[in-house]
Each structure stands twice: as C-alpha cells, then as structure tokens.
Image: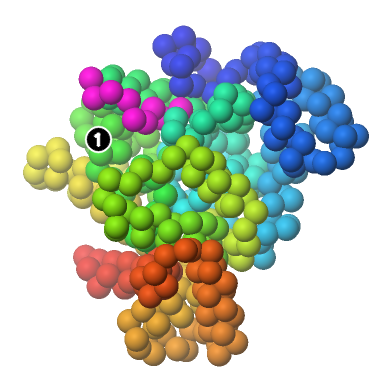
Amino acid sequence: MLVSNEFDEIRPYYDEEVPEYMNKLLADPVFARVLKNFFVDDAKIQEIREAMLQTRNVESFQLRFMMPFLENILNSSTRGLTVGGLENLKKDESYLYISNHRDIVLDSALLNVQMYKYGYNSTEIAMGSNLLVYQWIEDLSRVNRSFIVKRNVPVRETLEASKLLSAYIRQTITHNGNSIWIAQREGRSKDGLDQTSPALLKMLNMSNNQEFVQGFQELRIVPMTIAYEIEPCGNEKVAELLKRQSDPGFRKSEKDDLLSMISGLKNQKGRIQIQFGTPISRSELKELSAEGHINDRLKRLADYIDRQIYTNYRLFPNNYIAYDLYYNCNKYIDKYTTEEQKLFIELTHQRLKLVNEDRAEAMDLWLKMYSTPVYSFENCCQHDPA
C-alpha cells in the first residue's frame, strides 16, 4: 500500500492507529452515553469496553463489532438480504462501486457485510463530512474504513477539496488495491429517482492524467444497485420533501441527519437486494466518448451508469402497488396479491401518521417514492438503444 500524508485529513485510519482511537472513543463522554443507550446492562458495556481495548487493527474492529452489529440489524429489522452479480467481479481486483443511495448508513455497511461473507476484501466508504456531527462518529467511521468527502466548504476551497478526493480515490483503486463505494450523487434519493450526477464523474476525472477512456478504465467502475422492500426512512423523506416545497430555503440540521441514521437502523426494511452490474469496459467507454465536449461525454457516462442501476433494481410488489395507485391504473395488478396491496396500504397509513403535514400531499410523495423505480425501469427499456 502506498502511504502518503497527503490524504491524512480524509483517509481511513491505518491499522497502527486503531489502538489510539479505541482509547479516544472510550474517553469520549458522548460516546459513553451512546453505549449506555444501546446497552443498558453495565456488564455488557464493560465487556465492550474491554474488547475495544484489545482491538489492534481495522479487520479486528470490523469482525468484533461491525459484523455482529449489522447481522443483528438484518435479523431484527429485515426479511433477509440477497446479492446478485458477484460473478461479474474478480476477487483479486479493486473496483469503484457507484451506487444509488437510499439509507445514510446501511447501503454501504451492508455491502461490506456481503463482501466479507463471500470472501472479498471490505470496501472503503465515502462519507460526507456533514454526517460527522460528533468526533466519536468521525473516529468510528474512519476506523471502519470510511474516508471523508468534504461538504459545505467555502467556494474557494471546493476545487482543492475535489482534487484531493479525486486523487485519493484513484490512488486507492489503482495502487492500494482497495475497492471504494461512493453514492451516485450527493445525498440520498428521497423521491425514488436514482440519477448519477455528472459532477461526480467530473470530480473523478480531475485526477486523470490520461485520455478519457484510459482514465475511467483504470477506475474499473461497477454500477451497484440497492433496493429495499420498505424504505428505511420513508416518512422522514416525505416530511423533508414537504418542508422543501413550502420553504425552498429549508436546510436540514445535524440533528436531522443523526435521527435519520438511527431510524434507518431501527425501522423495518423488509427484503433487501444488492445487485452488482458489469464493470464498464474499454469498448463501452470508447463508444461513450466518441464525440462531443467533455461535459457531453460525462453526461453519456452518467446515463450509462443509470441504465445499469435501473435495470438491476429489484422491483418488489410494493413498487408495483404504488405505481398503480399513483397513476390510478391496474397496469401491474398481476405483480402483487390483494393481501400484499392491503399490507402496503396499512404500512402507508402507519408511516404517514408520523408526518405532521398535509395528508394528501404526503400520500402523493410517498407513492411517487415507491413507484419511480418502476417508471425508471420502463423509461430505460423504452429508450435503450439495444
């Protein structure tokens, strides 16, 4: 692995730094309260503290704490997780997984559980600095192989921050041999529309010292799709969209993001599917870059990633039910049962009771969030040049 202090402010912590940060976490009074909230039993808390003091590297931390924690989340709040497309990946290769984004913590965390389960190296995770509302969250995240994407920096610092991030991602994949997960755009999808931002690809291209094709080929981009049968923070997303409609200047607080993280972990999520697409090949990149300005090429690449995400998205009965309700039709009535429709409507009313806003508008946003993946799949297939 190439070690450089150039990336110290954003990189994950190294193995040799883990004991230091275990001690820092245990000395943090806020983290102590977090442990108390999660584990009421003093004996259990003491057991965890002692185990943390014995943790000497990143892998040990992940196996002792993160894997059991996430397995417990899967057992207590899901109906199971399935994975497809692993045959597209080589275990000795590093990849850049560009993924749709539905839950703050779980999208990438569940990916790492599966990578370990199937014998792949765990993946470094891009995490926005806006989520690191306490020092203990930053320390815990960076011990857990997360690196920082700087958000809300002054305009004059934005370019340098993007260049640093781009260089870090490229070095990690091409020289350090680690894979990376990054969301296709800033922030989670709240309306069900998964679209890759050309700005993300522009950032990745900042560290490219070669031609367009060679530069993106060495990143080994794999579009990744995650689908939840039940949106982990669906009612919170609806509430936020309603606030933005009534107040275009609305900005979430740090507390809002923290509450969403907790809700995503606790709330029922039903079945979950992670699907890997195929690595974008040199010939595909050549076709995408055949003509036009750099911005045109980036837009075509973004659209290509989207097509893989849309076609690989697992559509659950809830998605088809929401589509028929939203568009007032019976187009997909053969995709679900009367009982499944009844359960989805009950879930809808249960979750929207938590949204203290206009019910008709809330219902509209809720159904759109669930139905949009169906619309995206339809639209993708209708316009697929193949």
The C terminus, quarter of image? bottom left
Residue nearest the observer in this picture, 106 or 378: 106
Q: Is residue 97 left or right of residue 146?
A: left
Please check the rendered image and state whether residue 355 is part of the magenta-colored stretch, yes or no. Answer: no
Residue marked by disc 1: 202
Residue nearest the observer in this picture, 322 or 37: 37
Residue 20 locus on image (x, y percent): 68, 13
Residue 277 locus on image (x, y percent): 43, 54
Please check the rendered image and state whether residue 153 is part of the magenta-colored stretch, yes or no. Answer: yes
Residue 369 locus on image (x, y percent): 40, 66
Q: Which residues are magenta?
A: 148-156
Residue 104 locus on image (x, y percent): 50, 45
285 over 147 or under it: above or below: below
Q: Residue at x 46, y 21 (%)?
A: 10
Q: Residue at x 35, y 88 (%)?
A: 329
Q: Residue at x 42, y 65 (%)?
A: 357
Residue nearest the observer in this picture, 245 or 284: 245
Give the image quarter of residue 60.
top right
Please count the marks in the image.
1
The answer to whether residue 54 is seen in the rendering is: yes
Tell me the crowding category of disc 1: few under 14, some 14 to 19, or many 20 or more residues within 10 angstroms, Cα based.
Answer: some
Work out which residue is located at the far top of the displayed protein and give it. Answer: 5
Q: Is residue 153 left or right of residue 172?
A: left
Q: Is residue 14 left or right of residue 173?
A: right
Q: SS at mark 1?
A: helix
Mark 1: which amino acid? Lys
105 over 206 or under it: above or below: below
